[in-house]
Amino acid sequence: MTRRGEMFSGVTVALVTPMNPDGSLNEAMLRDLVDYHVESGTDCIAPVGTTGESPTLSHEEHERVIRIVCEQASGRIRVMAGTGSNSTSEAIRLTRAARDAGVDGSLQVAPYYNKPTQDGFLAHYQAIAEAVDLPLVLYNIPGRTGCNMEPDTICRIAETCPSVVAVKESTGNMDQASQILSGSDLTLLSGDDSLTLPLMALGGSGVVSVAANVVPRDVKAFVETWQAGDLSGARSWHEKLFPLCRDMLGLATNPIPVKAAMRMIGRDCGSVRLPLTPLNDRQEESLKTTLRNYGLDV
């Protein structure tokens, strides 16, 4: 089956938002990150998502990050900007702004906190799709939003919204992923680094990766190995990457540990904004050990 969102297959990096010591946006480092991922062979970058600390960015900062990323990307790498909201009108406004900035697509998180019904999810995405002509990627992460978009709902959205092309699957539920793949022609992307291999084995097309902020070339090589049909090689990459994903990303809420790791490997993107707080001393030492065990120079 040809899947409608294959333009987003491969590796999308869930991009961190660099901060200066005073907590403001570090625009120079943001541009450097775009160049870094172009040079690393990353297929797509996703600014201002969960990893990009979108909940604590002002609307002005949110739009500014997207504009900078698109300007720096300049067609060299795809951009899938996070523009979702639990307010449909706000999601439409953010998505229009991202479209005008030149993004290739929009990552639309399921409405959080207000816990819509399944019909509410459908109406939300229909309204966005009708208002903005842009490829949309659904982002289902009930652990953060408080409510799961059921597979039947996702398939209904696909049926009624041709511009919805893919789903970032972050439920950890293989049955749900299988239902989406069998019931629609949406491209499915893993939203959890540690589940990339099993989801690709089911028919997924890649990953929206947090770990690729730290080791983009390795995550790219992993996915390319699978795409080339080398199952043994892909399993070897999974076994190499799995401890890094588990022990780094499991230390604290994303993106706390990945920002700390980037600082340790010489790509300092600053700290996180409150209510997130930095790693404590014990966690810092644990992270250093994890990075050294992986083979990184810290």
Image (tube, grey):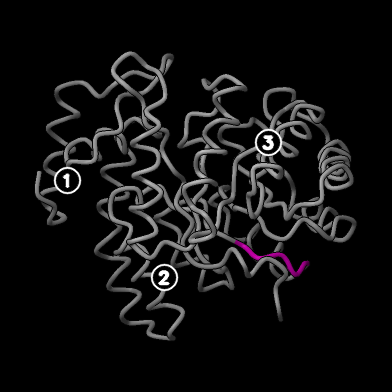
The residue type indicated by label 3 comes to: Gly
Image point (33%, 36%), residue name: 29
Considering every residue shown, the one lying at the far bottom of the view is 229
The magenta span reads: 184-188
Label 2 or label 1, whichever comes before in sequence order: 2
Asked if residue 187 is among those painted magenta in the image, a careful observer would answer yes
At label 2, counting other C-alpha atoms closer than 10 Å, the crowd grade (few under 14, some 14-19, many 20 or more) is: many
Q: Is residue 17 above or below residue 241?
A: above
Image point (41%, 61%), residue name: 42
Which SS class for mark 1? Answer: helix
Residue under pointer 1: 290
Of badges 1 and 3, the one in the foreground is 3
Which SS class for mark 3? Answer: loop
Image point (10%, 43%), residue name: 298
Asked if residue 75 is among those painted magenta in the image, a careful observer would answer no
Q: Quadrant of residue 58?
A: top right
* Residue 61 locus on image (x, y percent): 54, 24
Residue under pointer 3: 84
Image point (39%, 59%), residue name: 38
Q: What main secondary structure does the magenta stretch of the protein show?
A: loop
Residue under pointer 2: 223
In this rendering, would 15 be left or right of 163?
A: left
